[in-house]
């Protein structure tokens, strides 16, 4: 067994991982990246659509362009690619990893988790019927089309209106696939408004709200699906109709990827790592950033979080003391997601929230203090809140809430 030692070890080389590398190197600390793929970039490598980089580079880029441009800002670093982490010993700050060259035991001063998220599988929907070929998650369909140059089929139905599904509706249409429609069980869209406009409306692809698939048809290959209207989460009898298709693409959400560590660090109800504004987890020398904390809508924010995590991880690895937690955030009425759960109440910081349901005008409050008013607040779009301890009391229990107000 080969033994190595680094100030900071980073697990995952996507957008957050690359940011973490830059953050660590800014503190003159040694860093090792462990990545299961052959290179950095993660899902950016298959996202050939634009919309990346507006926050970090002030220009609109494709995913591969964003990956390449960001890497150019990062100094050389040590990395182990096509490597799998077998175990992490949090008590002794040691992990074991394996690749084609053998098994490694790696000592770290601090660990940064940038493992991203995985797609919610189609089986989680529990839709009755057969399981023929032709059923894909949106990310898998994107990989086939953009990286493998294969079309999944000729006539597609998309279930769920998450961003990747909306983007794939457009992508498949551009490749000559007939996209019959996007079916969303909720009465509101699941993706960003800009994607609904640019990916569906601009290509005359129907979005069917309060509608979803209730049965799969076909033996060896998908032959079609039955869809129905939904009310309060249940199908409405008599509204069923058959839709002929040979491809079903599921875009039904992402799950934070923390299976390796979720029994050792505190996680939220949705599986995300619970962190403070320093991106520190419940283990003092373990940090996390990106979609394994909460699902973000812009990759730029993921990278910025990674930089914060890497910088503070390096400080801990070098023996510097960082502030203790003074306050903890709690989801109040109307809030579904918080990106930060604890605060040291020492420096101003940004946190992001998602509301539970669409609101024409949402009033965001912290305890009884008004924070901001947001027009057209949607669960699919993160809301940025700037919290300054010189302006607000950020100690003890802090309840963040959102209520709809009349214009």
Image (spheres, rainbow, N blue to C red):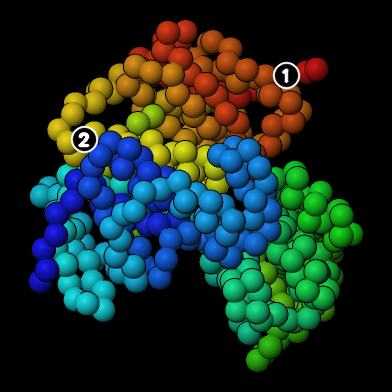
Q: Return the x and y of residue 178 as percentages of the image width and height.
A: 83, 74
Q: Is residue 236 left or right of residue 321?
A: right
**What residue is disc 2 on?**
316
On screen, residue 372 above or below 302: above
Q: Return the x and y of residue 243 as percentages of the image width and height.
A: 82, 74
Rendered-image quadrant of the C terminus: top right
On screen, residue 275 above or below 91: above
Q: Nearer the viewer, mark 2 or mark 1?
A: 2
In this view, the residue in front, 19 or 197, is 19
Q: Return the x and y of residue 224 as percentages of the image width and height.
A: 77, 79
On screen, residue 102 above or below 166: below
As drawn, which residue projects farthest toward the top?
Answer: 391
Mark 1 closeness class: few <14, some 14–19, many ≥20 residues within 10 Å: few
Quadrant housing residue 283: top left
What residue lies at 55% left-to-right and 70% top-to-bottom?
123
Which structural element holds mark 1?
loop
Which structural element holds mark 2?
helix
Label 2 – label 1 distance at C-alpha: 44 Å
**What residue is disc 1 on?**
405
What residue lies at 40% left-to-right and 57% top-to-bottom?
13
Residue 170 visible in image: yes
Asked if disc 2 and disc 1 are in contact, CB closer than 8 Å, the reply is no
């Amino acid at each position: 067994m080969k033994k190595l030692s680094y100030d900071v070890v980073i697990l995952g080389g996507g957008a957050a991982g690359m940011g973490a590398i830059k953050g660590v190197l800014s503190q003159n600390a040694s860093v090792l990246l462990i990545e299961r793929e052959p290179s950095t970039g993660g899902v950016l490598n298959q996202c050939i659509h634009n919309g990346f980089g507006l926050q970090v580079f002030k220009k609109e880029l494709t995913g591969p362009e964003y990956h390449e441009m960001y890497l150019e800002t990062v100094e050389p670093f040590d990395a182990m690619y096509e490597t799998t982490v077998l175990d992490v010993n949090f008590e002794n700050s040691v992990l074991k990893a394996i690749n084609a060259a053998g098994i490694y035991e790696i000592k770290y001063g601090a660990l940064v988790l940038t493992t991203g998220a995985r797609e919610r599988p189609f089986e989680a929907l529990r839709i009755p019927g057969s399981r023929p070929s032709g059923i894909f998650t949106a990310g898998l369909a994107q990989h086939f089309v953009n990286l493998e140059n294969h079309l999944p089929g000729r006539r597609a139905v998309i279930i769920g209106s998450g961003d990747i599904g909306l983007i794939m509706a457009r992508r498949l249409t551009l490749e000559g696939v007939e996209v019959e429609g996007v079916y969303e069980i909720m009465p509101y869209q699941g993706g960003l408004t800009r994607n609904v406009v640019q990916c569906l409306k601009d290509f005359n692809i129907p979005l069917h709200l309060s509608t979803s698939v209730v049965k799969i048809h076909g033996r060896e290959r998908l032959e079609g699906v039955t869809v129905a209207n939904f009310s309060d989460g249940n199908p409405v009898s008599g509204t069923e109709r058959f839709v002929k298709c040979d491809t079903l693409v599921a875009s039904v959400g992402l799950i934070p990827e923390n299976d390796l560590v979720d029994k050792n660090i505190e996680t939220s109800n949705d599986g995300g790592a619970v962190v403070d504004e320093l991106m520190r987890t419940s283990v003092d020398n373990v940090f996390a950033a990106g979609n394994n904390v909460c699902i973000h809508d812009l990759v730029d924010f993921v990278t910025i979080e990674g930089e914060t995590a890497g910088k503070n991880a390096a400080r801990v690895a070098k023996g510097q003391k960082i502030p203790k937690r003074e306050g903890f955030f709690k989801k109040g009425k109307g809030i579904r997601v918080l990106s930060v759960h604890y605060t040291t109440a020492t420096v101003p910081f940004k946190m992001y929230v998602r509301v539970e349901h669409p609101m024409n005008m949402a009033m965001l409050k912290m305890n009884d203090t008004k924070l901001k008013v947001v027009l057209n607040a949607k669960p699919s779009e993160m809301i940025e809140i700037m919290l300054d301890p010189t302006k607000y009391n950020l100690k003890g229990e802090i309840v963040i809430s959102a209520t709809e107000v009349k214009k």
